Image (cartoon, grey):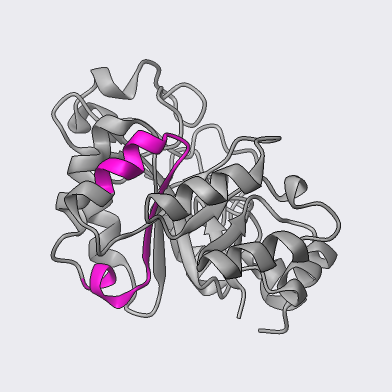
Amino acid sequence: MTIVVAHRGASAQAPENTMEAFRLGVEAGADAIELDVHLTSDGQLAVIHDDTLDRTTDRTGPVAERTMEEIREADAGATFARTGDSGIPFAGTGLTVPTLPEVLAWLPDEIGLVIEIKARAAADAVVDAVRDHPVRSSGRLAVISFDEHAIERVRELDREIKTGYLLVPTQPIEPALVWATEHGHTGVFPWEGDLGLDPLPLLAQAHIYGREIGCYVVNDPERMQHLAACGLWGFVTDVPDVARDALGR
């Protein structure tokens, strides 16, 4: 079964990487949620995509130069254009940038977690954070990164954690798949457009290597159906509710 991963939560419905987006992703039927982590100046793991606060909050400045307490003062709903189900804008409703331990404490038992390390310095802290959490031993945890050194560090620290290599758009998939195989990573995660109209040859090659191929970001229901029919391991989507309906979940 193709796994549906809520991209930064249900990020089309609520501000990305917030507890509300994660909650809505689970309610929409996602099999897992995906989130991004950065280290703060006091060594905590802030769940935020960018390396600055500028785009997604009402504050500015690098995450790495702020304490978690300072980051929590930011309004994580300030720049989200849509309103919630109540019709009230998310700005000013108290949404904050969560920490990874906060998300782990909330994570429902049956839901998987995909952690994207945005900077390799966070690898050690991520491994420490998940070490005693049930999701690590359940097989429903994956740590991914565009930075191959970050996932190499995770493998060095804990070989039981599944790791995946994120590929930038147009990056050749086959050499990356070979590299992932040689280094013991679970699979590769290219941009969905790089899979082409017929991903079956690539998926067959991955099967020979014993690796998985997922992709990002799929929001079109027909594309979801096609990739699932081809046997794709999973895809990341901003609209897990659309995926639920498209795949007949």
Q: Quadrant of residue 109?
A: bottom left
In the rendered view, tell whether residue 88 sits above or below residue 241: above
- Taking the image as shown, residue 173 lies to the left or right of residue 91, namely right
In the rendered view, tell whether residue 91 sits above or below residue 209: above
Work out which quarter of the rendered image holds the C terminus and state it: bottom right
Work out which quarter of the rendered image holds the N terminus and state it: bottom right
Q: Residue at x 18, y 37 (%)?
A: 44
Q: Residue at x 54, y 60 (%)?
A: 6
Query: Does 185 appear in magenta?
Result: no
Q: Nearer the viewer, residue 57 or 234?
A: 234
Q: Residue at x 25, y 64 (%)?
A: 160
| Residue 55 seen in the figure | yes
Label tally: 0
Q: Which residues lie in the magenta part?
A: 134-154
Q: Nearer the viewer, residue 136 or 76?
A: 136
Name the spot of residue 40 as percent of width and height, x first: 23, 29
| Residue 16 seen in the figure | no
Q: Quadrant of residue 95?
A: top left
Instruction: Farthest residue to the bottom: give it.
Output: 249
Q: Residue at x 26, y 67 (%)?
A: 136
- Taking the image as shown, residue 153 lies to the left or right of residue 23, namely left
Name the spot of residue 193 as percent of width and height, x first: 77, 46
Name the spot of residue 171 as percent of width and height, x first: 65, 35
- Taking the image as shown, residue 155 lies to the left or right of residue 5, namely left
Q: Nearer the viewer, residue 196 or 131?
A: 196
